C-alpha cells in the first residue's frame, strides 16, 4: 500500500515539477522585468547641470525655479 501511494506521490510531484519549470520565465524575461521602462527613465531627459552657478544663472535668465538634488555620503549608502 505504501509503495503504491509513494509511486502516486512521485508521479504527482513530477507532474507538478514539469508545470513549474514550464511556467518559469527565462533569464531574459527576468532581466526585462528588473530593468526600468521608458516611463521610469524620464528623469534622465531633464536638463541636468553639474555647475551650480551656471545653473543658477540659466534659471534666473529663463525665470524658472532651480531644483537642487543634494546628498551627503556615498551614493551606495555605505557611510
Image (cartoon, rainbow, N blue to C red):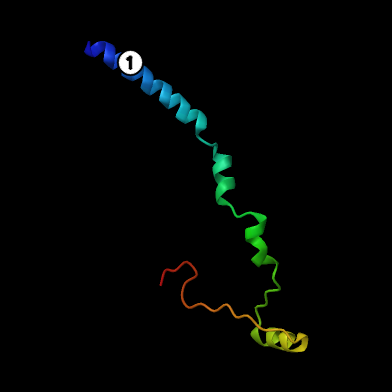
Q: Where 76 falls versus 8 (above or below)?
A: below
In x, y percent, where is residue 13? 37, 23
Location of residue 69 (image quadrant): bottom right
| Residue 59 percent location from the top left of the image | 72, 85
Quarter the C terminus occupies: bottom left
Above/below status of 13 relative to 63? above
Q: Residues within 10 Å of mark 1 (few under 14, many from 20)?
A: few
Give the residue displayed 55% in from the left and 36% down from the top: 26
Q: How many numbered dots are placed on residues in this image?
A: 1
Q: Where does the N terminus fall, quadrant-wise? A: top left
Tell me if 74 is positioned left or right of 46 in this view: left
Return the residue found at the far left: 2
Element at label 1: helix
Residue identified by numbered label 1: 8
Residue 16 in the image: state x and y as whole percent.
41, 25
Q: Would residue 11 appear left or right of 57 to someone viewing this image?
A: left
Which of 46/63 is in front?
Answer: 63
Is 40 or 77 nearer to us in this picture?
40
Q: Residue at x 33, y 15 (%)?
A: 8
Q: Quadrant of residue 5?
A: top left
Q: Residue at x 54, y 79 (%)?
A: 70
Give how far across and how far down residue 42 sits, in percent: 67, 63
Q: Residue furthest right?
A: 61
Query: In percent of the image, x 73 and y 89: which residue is there?
Result: 60
Amino acid at each position: 500500500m505504501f509503495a503504491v501511494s509513494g509511486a502516486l506521490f512521485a508521479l504527482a510531484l513530477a507532474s507538478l515539477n514539469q508545470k513549474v519549470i514550464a511556467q518559469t520565465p527565462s533569464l531574459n524575461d527576468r532581466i526585462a522585468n528588473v530593468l526600468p521602462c521608458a516611463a521610469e527613465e524620464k528623469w534622465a531627459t531633464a536638463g541636468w547641470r553639474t555647475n551650480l552657478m551656471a545653473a543658477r544663472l540659466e534659471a534666473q535668465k529663463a525665470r524658472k525655479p532651480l531644483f537642487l538634488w543634494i546628498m551627503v555620503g556615498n551614493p551606495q549608502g555605505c557611510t
